[in-house]
Image: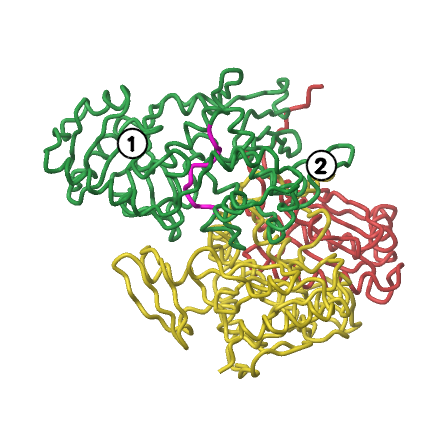
Amino acid sequence: MQQPREKVDEWEPKIIAFLCNWCSYAGADLAGVSRLQYPPNTRIIRVPCSGRISPLLILRSLQHGADGVLVSGCHPGDCHYISSNYVARRKFAILNNFLDYLGIEKGRVQFAWISAAEGKRFAELVQKVTEEVRTLGPATRLVRKQG
Amino acid sequence: MKELEIAKTEVVSLLNTLIRKYKVFAPVEQNSFITFQEIHAGSEAFLDYINSKRPPKEIFFPQSERLFSYDLSKGEGWGVEEPTLEEKQKIIFGIRPCDARSLVLLDNVFDGQLYKDPYYTDKRKNTTIIAIGCNQPSSTCFCTSLGGGPFSQDGSDLLLVDIGQKYIIQVVTERGEKLAKEHNNFKEAEDHSLSLMRDNIETAEALIKSKIEVQKVTEKLDSMFDDPFWDLVSEKCLGCAVCTYLCPTCYCFDINDEVIAQRGERVRTWDSCAFPNFTLQASGVNPRPSSKERLRQRIMHKFNYFVANHGMAACVGCGRCIKECPVNLDIQVVLNSILNRQDIG
Amino acid sequence: MLNTSVAIRDIAKKLLDEKKVDLIIGFEKGSVPLRSTPCFVRSTSEADRLIWNVNCENNLAKYLPKIKEKVGIVAKGCDVRSIIGLIKENQVTREQVFIIGIPCKGMIDRRKIEVKLDGKEILEAEEKDDTIILKGHNLKETIKKEEFLHDSCKTCTHRNPVIYDVLIGDKVVEDQAADEYRDVKEFEAKSHDERWQSFSDEVSKCIRCYACRNACPFCYCQECFVDSSQPQWIGKTTNLSNTAIFHIIRAFHAAGRCVDCGACDRACPMGIDLRRLTKKMEMDVKDLFHYEAGISLEDVPPLATFNPDDPQEFILV
């Protein structure tokens, strides 16, 4: 099957968002239903809980060419699975510090808590993150190059 | 052709001359250890060394090698691209005789009667090997037990012997002779130089204390497959790939596709029989489930199976595995244990 | 003066005789100078192989996960902390392990000696009090042990085993003043670009032999993420992306568990500064969650628990 040639005149950031099913994904859905505008650069992947997020998912996204990664879950205390997001918060803290330590630009990988009622906040957040990633430019540091 | 000689002070300019016509690989100091790299100036070569950390097999059999790539995104079919042939003639300068022999050994595998690997043979056929013999073999060297020696000519086109201010050049092959004739910095060796050379060779060979009767090891291994010996000797093995990746004669590889979206490449990468999943089959069965089976495999392959298939042990006695093994699992100790093993039953 | 090797042999023989253990894991003389090698002893006659010296740098706790036998293990301060971690992670039970604890003044980094000798080969090494006498071709040099210790030993804060069943020798003075995170802080002071460049240069040396992973007592997964093919998390080639992610994830998997025994660093044949990564993990776990690995059998590993007040300034709320 022939794929259409990609016309890339101007680079647009590609952002992968891992959203927890119960809060953040519902919040994104609410943004859509409310017809709120936000940049189309974000591709959403639904996961059961932010506690499911492994650094492997985040790094693989960067390896495969994501310019930014957003991870979002329920607010602490509101996790559908009671305490998973608390444990996730610890993992995220360690990973966030570590990536910064190694020289991955601040703003490439971001974490948020978005509830199911926060449709407007989700749109604003995506706007903010997209602009930050746009300023950083295309990701080069962990991308797997060919050859 | 008679032996030639060249003053050490002229080696840099010799290399510079060679670099103009050939792709020259020489030992280079990088990150406080020695590896073989392409040099662009004679002064980059570092010749005052025992041996390189990484084996020179990687010049012909790189750790990661692209077999072909494809690109679907161009919209013109698969867009398959194969790597271009190595056209330029190459020289490997300063390789040790053990490593030169390892290339002859690898030729059995990659350039054999039935199978010829073009990715290997392309690089190999255009290469001249200029080895430098070892005046001071390391205490971990045991090349003489494997049919080699600090001044073995196997695999070299020219063999250099360091006699202090000069190198004596032994011309081994026609290819070496052709190269030697191209260069007029080579003079005919003086008698005095030749006698120094013979002294050096004698001293060096005497320094290798290790004398393992490898032929007896091969014979003993014929009946040792089920010997409980393997449980004991493998207990401390960590199952990493230090010995296999740094070994100049190990050649197992894996083939994978590395794909990102619509572009991918098929790559060949080094693999190690020490890894647990090396023999993991699609059914889930693993015929070598523990370090016992895997260490047994390593030893049997090198000192029994390869001998049966190719007439030589798959080891050149370079000692890298001994130096670098994180738990000091010494192959010489294993071989001696095999020799001392009492026959069971 | 106590001869530690003899003391270890005596206790080993006693334990095997009394059938308190089936196996003793210790060290015996290596096959080359400045090396000792792990040794597995199952009978009193074999126990005479056991020794102790400044080359006993491996972490023998590596051999404990999933072990079925009752085992006596010779363990220095850092090794004991690993054993505590493994017990907490249910890889071995406290009852299975008879800890022969050795207060440790540090192990020698033979690579530092090789650098000092500028490539001259060491044919003989003899320990004498605080020094080591090195001999080779046209070489005789005496060096001070404390100048050639592994970096992890120089800043060690738990030289004495935290728990043990028998202690061989007197406890040594703990050096609490050493700034064990000095290198991490120095690295943090560099710019993002400098850090990335330095990290890339360092991991570019990697040959993916996985000696670091295999030497670590905490790397005991049945299937390591690098071997996963469905999905394949990282490729097998040695390009920077694959290798960098391997090291990032390996360090991450050790977070909260790593006790800085240095086994990874010592195993690496290419001399990669792995502790630059693991030390950062250790520092963060201490700063953020006030946890130190391998000290207590009771506390919960930090990434398996939480505190409602955990720091979250980095999270976009």
Whether residue A147 appears in this view of the structure is: no
Q: Are marks 2 and 1 on the same chain?
A: yes
Check disc 1 and report the residue beneath it.
Answer: B130
Q: Give me the disc on residue A5.
A: none
Q: Is residue C52 magenta?
A: no
What is the quadrant of residue B197 in the picture?
Answer: top left
Rendered position, B298 above or below C306: above
Judged from this view, the residue extending furthest toward the front is B345
Q: Which chain is red?
A: A
What residue span does the magenta drawing correspond to? Answer: B312-321
What is the quadrant of residue C256 in the picture?
Answer: bottom right
- The image position of residue C158, as x and y in percent, is 59, 76
Q: Give me the disc on residue B287.
A: 2
Name the residue nearer the viewer: C268 or B236. B236
Name the N-terminal-most of marks 2 and 1. 1
Name the residue nearer the viewer: B79 or C97. C97
Quadrant assignment for the C terminus of chain B: top right
- The image position of residue A23, as x and y in percent, is 86, 55
Q: Does residue C269 appear left or right of residue C158 in this picture?
A: left
Visual hue assigned to chain C: yellow
Q: Amino acid at mark 1?
A: Ile
Q: Nearer the viewer, mark 2 or mark 1?
A: 2
Q: Callout 2: helix, strand or loop? A: loop
Q: Does residue B204 appear left or right of residue C289 in this picture?
A: left
How is the rendered protein coloured? by chain
Badge 1: few (under 14), some or many (20 or more) residues near its Cα, within 10 Å?
many
Whether residue A17 appears in this view of the structure is: yes
Q: Callout 1: helix, strand or loop? A: strand
Whether pointer 2 and pointer 1 mark residues with C-beta atoms closer than 8 Å, the reply is no
CA gap between label 2 and label 1 equals 42 Å
Residue at 60%, 24% (x, y): give it: B70
Residue at 37%, 46% (x, y): give it: B34
